[in-house]
Image: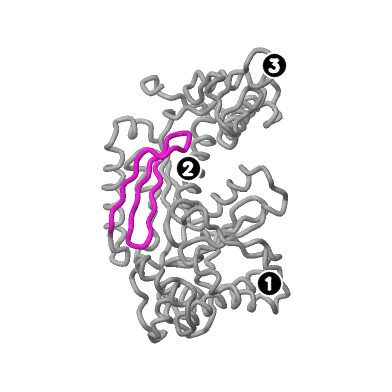
């Protein structure tokens, strides 16, 4: 068995730092990489030469430098050649299971979307067997579009609405399926021969928002503590604490939507009663607006057009529709009050379809934060520029590609000469 020496560890660490630099800052000159990583020029030259030889990164002519990349090519004298990740060095597949929808998206090594396929299914009727069968069928169909997709596949990320294991191997439970305790990572790894991670959907949203903050360059230590709350067919939360995603000891944890709000309260999709989700999700708002009993079974799916009309009616006149959104805001406010009793208050970003109705929820949400002592309205913001789907894909792809950087190419794996 080969042993890893300290020099090997240093070499692997330096490869990882340089790949991370190019992942986060796109194309850079060797001088730019040295400035950003703190590595010496000689180290950068040697490591990047190895990475080029391995087919992982490539040299880019000065005229091809893009906006937002290193500007050292504008210095006087001979223009510096930039380096960037090779788009064809690897492929990653991101699989998302949302309410009644299974979607597969392929990305190249630079994060560019290559192919996307989806299938409609009734998630409430899924068993572990049928979920696995549909996953394999959809992944195979997506990879079949081009021979190189299968040949360069290095990682698969499965994004799940529900609780996943802390080792990112298994789905534990979900309010949208009957699938419990299923090791998807092992099943897919045995079939495709690549590593697999299973991710919670809200944590990928938080990862995407954190990356956006870092990319903006206008950050400070306080930006390392925030939460993203998904307001949609379900209610979820992803928390960044001191610069990393907060998870439980055995599971992904942070099940904000299933915190108890009212004992023996309204029926939640998870089967329990009184959860925050049973008052703040789209199906809960719909149930209250339609004045259905709290024990009424959650609607399987609320179409976007109908929900938009509900928002419009609540905005134009008082009635049960407006009251339903007020109840949703109160539920979120109470949930945050309980959360802030455990943690110091931190910024909260609202994403998802229901955030479009934030003006209808804002007053009741803030009212239920007042007794905690937080009256800072800047504590709560809404994210309008990207959909929840886009954020989930962005966050999951980033985590999958970072995994390839750290666990595949940092360890010296070479890209097959047939693909470089």
Q: Is 354 or 120 nearer to us in this picture? A: 354
Q: Which residue is drawn at 54% across and 30% down?
A: 410
| Whole-number angstrom distance, CA of label 2 to CA of label 3 | 39 Å
Question: Where's residue 254, x and y in %?
Answer: 55, 64
As drawn, the residue found furthest toward the front would be 316
- On the image, numbered disc 2 is attached to which residue? 400
Q: What stretch is highlighted in magenta?
A: 93-120
Position of 293 relative to 199 (above/below)? below
Q: Is residue 367 above or below residue 173?
A: below
Q: Is residue 354 part of the magenta span, yes or no?
A: no
Report the Cα–Cα distance between label 1 and label 2: 34 Å
Residue 132 visible in the picture: yes
Count of numbered labels shown in the rendering: 3
Name the front one of labels 3 and 1: 3
Q: Mark 3 points at which residue?
A: 76
Q: Which residue is drawn at 50% across and 52% down?
A: 167
Nearer to us: label 2 or label 3 = 3
- Which tag, 1 or 2, sits closer to the chain's start? 1
């Amino acid at each position: 068995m080969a042993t890893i020496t300290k020099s090997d560890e240093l070499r692997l660490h330096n490869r990882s730092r340089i790949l991370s630099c190019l992942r986060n800052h796109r194309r850079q000159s060797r001088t730019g990489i040295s400035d950003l990583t703190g590595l010496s020029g000689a180290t950068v030259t040697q490591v990047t030469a190895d990475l080029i030889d391995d087919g992982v990164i490539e040299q880019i002519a000065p005229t091809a430098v893009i906006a937002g990349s290193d500007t050292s090519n504008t210095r006087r004298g001979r223009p510096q050649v930039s380096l960037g990740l090779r788009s064809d060095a690897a492929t990653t597949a991101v699989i998302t299971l949302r309410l009644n929808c299974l979607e597969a998206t392929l990305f190249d090594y630079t994060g560019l979307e290559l192919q996307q396929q989806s299938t409609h299914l009734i998630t409430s009727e899924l068993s572990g067997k049928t979920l696995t069968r549909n996953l394999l069928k959809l992944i195979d169909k997506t990879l079949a579009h081009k021979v190189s997709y299968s040949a360069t596949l290095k990682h698969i990320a499965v994004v799940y609405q529900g609780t996943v294991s802390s080792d990112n191997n298994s789905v534990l439970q979900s309010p949208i399926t009957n699938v419990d305790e299923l090791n998807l990572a092992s099943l897919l790894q045995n079939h495709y021969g690549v590593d697999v991670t299973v991710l919670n959907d809200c944590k990928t949203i938080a990862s995407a928002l954190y990356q956006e903050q870092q990319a903006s360059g206008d950050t400070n230590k306080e930006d390392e503590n925030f939460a993203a709350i998904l307001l949609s067919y379900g209610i979820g939360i992803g928390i960044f604490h001191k610069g990393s995603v907060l998870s439980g000891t055995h599971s992904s944890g942070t099940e904000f939507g299933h915190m108890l709000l009212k004992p023996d309260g309204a029926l939640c999709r998870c089967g329990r009663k009184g959860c925050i989700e049973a008052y703040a999700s789209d199906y809960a708002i719909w149930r209250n607006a339609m004045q259905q009993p709290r024990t009424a079974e959650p609607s399987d799916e609320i179409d976007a057009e109908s929900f938009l009309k509900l928002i419009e009616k609540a905005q134009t006149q008082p009635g049960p529709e407006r009251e339903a959104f007020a109840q949703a805001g109160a539920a979120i406010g109470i949930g945050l009050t309980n959360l802030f009793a455990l943690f110091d208050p931190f910024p909260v970003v609202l994403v998802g379809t229901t955030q479009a109705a934030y003006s209808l929820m804002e007053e009741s949400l803030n009212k239920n934060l007042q007794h905690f002592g937080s009256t800072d309205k800047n504590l709560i913001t809404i994210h309008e520029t990207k959909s929840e789907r886009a954020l989930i894909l962005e966050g999951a792809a980033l985590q999958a590609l970072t995994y390839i950087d750290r666990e595949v190419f940092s360890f010296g794996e070479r890209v097959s000469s047939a693909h470089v």
